[in-house]
Amino acid sequence: MCIGIPLQVLALSPGHALCDDAGTPRQVRTTLLGDGITPGDWLLVFLDNAIERLSPARAAEIRHTLALLAGAMAGRQLDSSGDAGFDLPSRWTTAQLHALSGQPVSASTPEAP
């Protein structure tokens, strides 16, 4: 399985960024994103290509989700009652789910999922 990994930019050179990959420096290509990348930015990296700029909050959500997946793959029991590190759709109200899907919310839409 191939997935994008959030990495934080340490330094830049033309067309490339040196990023932090869990304490290991990793060189990635930035040509798909163009100019405007600065040290400290978060990038979504797929096959050594930066494909998207991420907010720090979104990078944290993705990193936490990847940690949960790694734990599940290692056979660790997941605690569904704990904090996932982001807002789980299973905890959303029906109105929030309707808004996400673009469905109109009526006065009769129940609040509980």
Image (cartoon, rainbow, N blue to C red):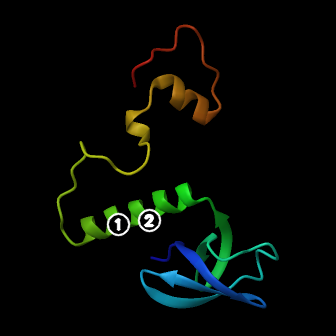
Query: Circle 2 sits on which residue?
Result: 63
Q: Is mark 1 on a helix, strand or loop?
A: helix
Q: Residue at x 35, y 66 (%)?
A: 67
- In the rendering, at what x and y percent does residue 100 appear? 59, 35
Residue 31 vs residue 2: left or right?
right
Q: Quadrant of residue 51?
A: bottom right
Q: Where on the picture, by quarter, is residue 56?
A: bottom right
Which quadrant holds residue 105?
top right
Q: Which of 23 and 30 is in front in this view?
A: 23
Q: Is mark 2 on a helix, strand or loop?
A: helix
> Is 30 situated above or below 106?
below
Q: Which residue sits at x=32%, y=62%?
A: 68
How many badges with numbers are in the image?
2
For label 2, count other residues whose C-alpha is less than 10 Å away and answer few (under 14), some (14-19) or many (20+): some
Give whichever of 52, 90 is nearer the camera: 52
Vertical relation: 40 (above or below) 86:
below
Q: Categorize mark 1 by other alpha carbons within 10 Å: few (<14), some (14-19), many (20+).
A: few
Q: For the residue marked with disc 1, what is the amino acid?
A: Ala
Side (left or right) of 61 relative to 76: right
Distance (Cα) linking label 1 and label 2? 6 Å
Q: x and y percent of residue 103 in the render?
A: 63, 27
The residue lying furthest to the top in this view is: 107
Residue sitting at 38 percent across and 51 percent down? Answer: 85
- Amino acid under label 2? Arg
Circles 1 and 2, Cβ within 8 Å, touching? The answer is yes
How far from the left and from the top, in percent, is residue 54?
A: 62, 63
Taking 62 as reference, is 82 above or below it?
Answer: above
The dot on residue 22 is: none
Q: What residue does disc 1 label?
A: 67
Q: From the image, which quarter does the N terminus lie in? A: bottom left
